[in-house]
Image: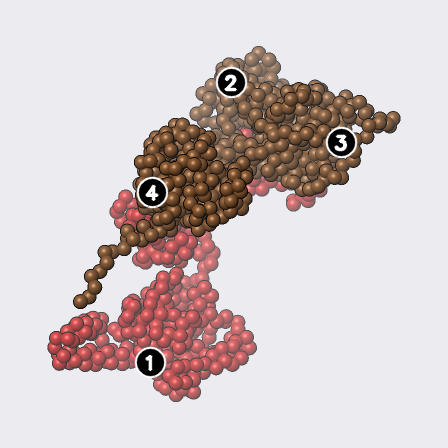
Amino acid sequence: MNRAVVLLLLMCGAVAVSGCAVTGGAGADSGRRGFASLQAATAEAAEGAKGTVVLVKLKGDALTGDQSLIIEGGRMRTSEQAGAKTATGLILTTNGYVVVAENINPSDVTRVEAWVGDTEYRANVIKNDPQLGITVLKMDVDAPVKALNIATADDLQVGEWCVAVQPSDEVLDYEQLITLAVCRGQSAGLYREFLLDSSQAFRPGTPILGLSGNVVGIVQRRGSVLSMNDIRDDLLALIEEAAGVKSADEEAKKKAWFGAMLSAINKDYARKYGLSKSYLWVHHVVQDGSADSAGVKPGDLIVRVNGRDMRLTDQRAREFFNKALRPKVGQPFRVTVLRDGKMLDLEGVFTKEPEPETVLATDLGVTVKRIDGSDVVNMNLFTGEGVLVVDVKRGSAASVGSNMRSGLLNTGDVITAVDGTPTPDLATFSAVLEALRREQKEIMLVAYRRGRTTGLAALNLKIGEKDTEGGKRK
Amino acid sequence: MNDKTQSCRHALWFAFGVLLVSGANGLMAQEQPQAQADQDIPDAIVRKVDPSVVAIKHESAIGSGFIISTDGYILSNGHVVRGSDDEDPMEPAQSITVILNDERKFPAKVLGFCMNPDVALLKIECDTPLSPVEFADSRNAQIGQKVFAVGTPQGFKRTFSSGILSNVDRTDLGTFTKVIQTDAAINPGNSGGPLFDRDGKVLGLNTYASQGANNLGFTIPIHVAEEIRKDLMTSGRFIRADVPVFSVSEVYEEMKLALGVERGVLVDYVMENTPADSAGLRAGDVIIRQNGQPMAAATQAELKDVIWALTILEPGTPVEWVVLRKDGNAYKEVKILATIQEAEPMPGTQRFPGELKTQKLDAVGLSFMDIVSTHRIMHGLQDDPGILVHAAEKGSPAEMAELRGGDIVTHVGGLQVTDVASFSQQLESLLSTQEKYIDMTIRRRQISVKTVLAPYYDLMGKRVLVVVPSDEPRYLDLVRRELIAHGAMLTFASVSGTCTEATLKDVKKLSAVASDAVDLLILLDGGNARDDWENETLLELIRGVFNAEGVLAGVGSSVITLVLADPGLLAKKMTTSKDDSSEAIRRKALYTGKAVEQDVGLVTTTGFDRKTVRAFLKEVVRAGSGAGGKRASSMNEPEAAPEAP
């Protein structure tokens, strides 16, 4: 059954209601037809998911959890048992990767069984993502198995019907347990969540199918349903990582950067100008960063990211953006921005964030850092032409000024010249120092920028120990 | 000109107390008339200085001071006489009393004060000549010399304590000038009191003490105080001279060697586009002469003296500096000509409240101020013109607009604003038309932010009549600004239809106002408010508003008028100014004496200070937002529906 059928069904319903008062007979007839369609759609959807829902039994001393389902007056309850746990899994690949909508630590598990109907597979916990609350298992399969197609996922609308498909177990002895449910509401978290009229009764991991037969979501722990369209990319990425198709290169993940300063749009501003409250302002774009190379400009409003409309507000909108952006070195990204009233689609590829580079100048007693594009904005520097003091060693030449409570140089100062030679970058700074060391100078004149102001400091190089690190305060 | 001294981080408190000790007078020993041979301070000296030292008390603090003339001029510290107005740091306390050593009490007037250096000049009116102190030459104070302090530590009047001068060149307190350090006990309450030399001549004003330490007291040299006194006497404020904006530092030993100059004062920084910049002064210059005289500082103490010498020049004085400037490897002498001008007001810091007024608009929860160049240096602000946000109150429209302290508001409603005046004017014009969303552009450090202020307009649609006395209405501007920002439909009236307040353009004659056109009636205090107590037109108007269940509010003396209008009002809780409280009691009003009193439909205040009036306005808005009573509801009610047949 396809989406057209569902639409037809709903329209029939509408006709039935409005037409009721006029011609009773025709209305009843179309109502019956509609109801028949509903039944057919439900059965078809359930059939489609058959064989892709797994009953997972986990054993391990640290586990406690639901052992079995007991049906009691139509509602399901679970009993708890220490050392064992059951969960509902979904087969997402034909080679047996299964996702479970619970966070299960692989080290807690000693044995895993995966039951698909009457067939038992041995399985292993491969990877868990505590933030998503998802765990990936791998079943040992000899031949390809049926997998749920999440690529065609639909979105559930409030008021729409859907089908929950749950696995059976020995206690229940149902081959498959399906429940017809209505979507009662939708909330916009980091991922959209649907609330079903009976979702509290569904175990985490239960797939929810629309009447079109496409999967719409997966039940999570709190009883709400995560939108499959929203978590699909994360699920697939997790499976890819688990399968080793792409290595979980945490380093690459960390170092990839967007290179822009963003903040949420003010809500009243959004109201006044009819904009979404979820948009993000771009305040600053770091030169040669990923955002810069994609053509993002300060003043842009971010509307969409990687094909997903911006959602949520304030800090959570930024979280959403970061999540949806999936920064990984070498990965492409797409953002849609609103610039001068026009929507612009911008594409870029994540580059590696430059490593911070520092130099310890022991004779001066300071550690200095190369100034990156983001430092200028983040630290409100009034020049980028210099090296940034990130540490002043106690007892060093730089730390002893005429006032006992402050040194000649402070953290946050930008050294712009040494003995009259400009030091616009770290390499020049090191070279200038080296040259001066060869001259065995006893006093060094350091020009610096401190906030808006400028200053000169004459450092007495006889002061302070040069050899030992981490001098202690006397 | 500034020195580059870092503000020191150690805790330092002002040596004044906050009414800690009550009934302390009872503990005081009686004067001992007979001299004793082993007295450290000779009896003649004690008797000479004792009548010159006074205790000072006002609504929020106690301190000390000393008489400098027979006709009642008194020196003290700025922080002793300063009020607690958080909008105007230069507002003195409201009710200051000076107590002489013979227990005579006088109300005192503050002629002016300055917070850094911390000096105040007061005046009392006394029929008999008073006994002034003599000044010592504090420039020649010596370390080790015997000194004694007199003052009111912790409220103990006429406390003598003695010690020596511990240092005479103290520069690392972050004060504008050098201060003298002594180990004579200086405690809270000693502030503003004198430090005498062994001859009973004043060396300085005891001002600070170091917290958590023993006997580290600090005294402002009397020669510094005397310079400030002159200005306070003639202009009511200390006029600091400057050629803005540059900073200097001393040429210390290493600097001398590094620069290859013998002596001078090093120019660290010259702000772009300032008089110092256009005079041709450059960072790195070494000033060696000022007006033909050698100018040099090798230590911070010398630097403070150099700066002080410049600071006390008359604005308008031409100044000629000769500076050494690098020319290749050698130095050449360059002449710089500039004119001394008055320094801009100092912004507040953690320790000093500064001299700049903060403008507050409670209705939107915003406080803001003009930007001075010191702000730009202190907070690393960009050059954008605008106003500086001081704070945005929690839960207010300003906070909703995400305004933060340190932001520069550059545009309001699409128009550039450059200072508090243009900002207020632009904002007010938008508020007066109850603009739902007000565009603002902000410069926050290096980024630009667009936002929208959405005021609450708590008094939207409310017809508010403010009745002012015809001369010198108090708090008029404050009340007007807040009511407009609350979205009130504002009308002003006075009994005569006139008002001396120039900013008030349109004042109606009271007789031209109909009471049924008023939801909220506010009576302001001022010059001749008492004349209106029995004014029948006003009483009639009040009765009208009262009977229609409108809200009535009054400040100070005018509250008497309110309660006289109707026996129903006389039965409500009220408050009024202290001066009028006996009148309230005589008329059998329910006077409670609170700063702000609130009963159903009646809000009153003493009108003591700006803070009180703001608290009063808050209550007025709360009461007024529901005002309109019978009339408003009957106006909104639809026509009675015809009954169903």
What kind of residue is marked 1?
A: Ile
Q: Which chain is red?
A: A
Q: Chain of mark 1?
A: A
Task: Give coordinates of residue B386: x percent, y percent.
Answer: 40, 34
Asked if one can make out residue B499 in the rendered structure from this viewpoint, the answer is: yes
| Label located before the other in sequence (4 or 2) | 2
| Disc number for residue A467 | none
Q: Nearer the viewer, mark 1 or mark 3?
A: 3
Query: Is label 3 on the same chain as label 2?
Result: yes
| Chain B: colour as depicted | brown
- Determine the secondary structure under disc 3: strand
Q: How many numbered markers are drawn?
A: 4
Residue named by callout 1: A178
Label 3 to label 4, Cα distance in Å? 64 Å
The mark lying in front, picked from 3 and 4, is 4
Residue B57 image point, x, y percent? 63, 34
Rendered image quadrant of residue B137? top right
Q: Residue at x 51, y 81 (%)?
A: A81
Counting residues from the start of the chain, the first of labels 3 and 4 encountered is 3
CA separation, marks 3 and 2? 40 Å
Name the residue nearer the viewer: A107 or B517.
B517
Binning the other alpha carbons within 10 Å of mark 4 as few (below 14), some (14 to 19) or many (20 upward) gives: many
Residue designated by label 4: B515
Q: Amino acid at mark 4?
A: Ser
| Residue linked to disc 2 | B315
Q: Is residue A290 visible?
A: no
Tell which subunit mark 4 falls on. Answer: B
